[in-house]
């Protein structure tokens, strides 16, 4: 794994900088894109309410996948989360706090994670709990990007800061 970004973030923090990451998430399955009109990833197939998957480790998820209790899409989604969590853990282990902005620009309809408010909230809350409870990433400050319609807001328990993207067209 090339950790150039992590090394640069550590150096930036050591020199007094504030580290911030925005995650524009490529679809976990299929074409590597985050644009909804370019990918064939089916977020509905990934959602699972059978068990509390947010806190299950990768071994438990592998078993659930082999027993067909979760879909390949669900497994890929959570595996992507774990991959990002491992990178963020390197910063935590170095004492670096991160302004973390996943799943930006809600309800614009541009990205695969914006299918609808229920899906968006499930995805955000699952990620938050997975990063916090399973991976122990207490170094993250969660930033939610609001827009005109706050219907996607994942809830006060899952957000530290609310921001807004403004585009001057």
Image (spheres, helix red, strand yellow):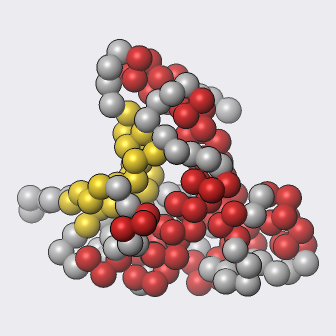
- Percent x, y for residue 92? 55, 34
Nearest to the observer: residue 157 or residue 1? 157
- Percent x, y for residue 128? 52, 60
The vertical placement of 5 against 40, above or below, is above
- Percent x, y for residue 124? 48, 67
Nearest to the observer: residue 27 or residue 7? 7
Whether residue 75 sits left or right of residue 89 in the image: it is right
Asked which quadrant contains residue 27, the reply is bottom right
Q: Which residue is depicted at the point 52% across and 45% down?
A: 138
- Percent x, y for residue 73? 69, 72
Residue 144 visible in this rendered orientation of the protein: yes
Residue most extreme to the top: 15
The C terminus lies in which quarter of the figure? Answer: bottom left
The vertical placement of 30 against 22, above or below, is below
How many badges with numbers are in the image?
A: 0
Whether residue 22 sits left or right of residue 167 in the image: it is right
Q: Which residue is depicted at the point 73% across and 84% down?
A: 50
Whether residue 58 sits left or right of residue 130 in the image: it is right
The vertical placement of 161 against 16, above or below, is below
Nearest to the observer: residue 92 or residue 123? 92
The N terminus lies in which quarter of the figure? Answer: top right
Asked which quadrant contains residue 67, the reply is bottom right
Q: Which residue is depicted at the point 89% across and 68% down?
A: 63
Q: Which residue is depicted at the point 36% across and 68% down?
A: 156
Residue 112 visible in this rendered orientation of the protein: no
Asked which quadrant contains residue 72, the reply is bottom right
Nearest to the observer: residue 26 or residue 95? 95
Residue most extreme to the left: 168
């Amino acid at each position: 794994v090339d950790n150039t970004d992590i090394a640069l973030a550590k150096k930036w923090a050591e020199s007094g900088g504030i580290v911030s990451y925005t995650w524009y998430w490529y679809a976990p399955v299929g074409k590597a894109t985050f644009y909804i009109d370019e990918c064939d990833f089916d977020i509905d197939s990934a959602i699972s309410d059978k068990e509390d998957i947010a806190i299950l480790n990768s071994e438990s998820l592998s078993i659930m996948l082999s027993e067909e209790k979760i879909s390949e899409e669900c497994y890929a989604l959570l595996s992507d989360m774990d991959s990002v969590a491992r990178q963020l853990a390197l910063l935590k282990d170095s004492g670096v706090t991160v302004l973390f902005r996943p799943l930006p620009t809600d309800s614009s309809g541009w990205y695969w994670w914006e299918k609808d408010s229920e899906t968006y909230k499930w995805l955000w809350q699952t990620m938050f709990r997975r990063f916090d409870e399973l991976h122990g990433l207490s170094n993250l400050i969660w930033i939610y990007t609001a827009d005109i319609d706050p219907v996607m807001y994942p809830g006060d328990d899952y957000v530290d800061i609310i921001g807004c993207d403004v585009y001057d067209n």
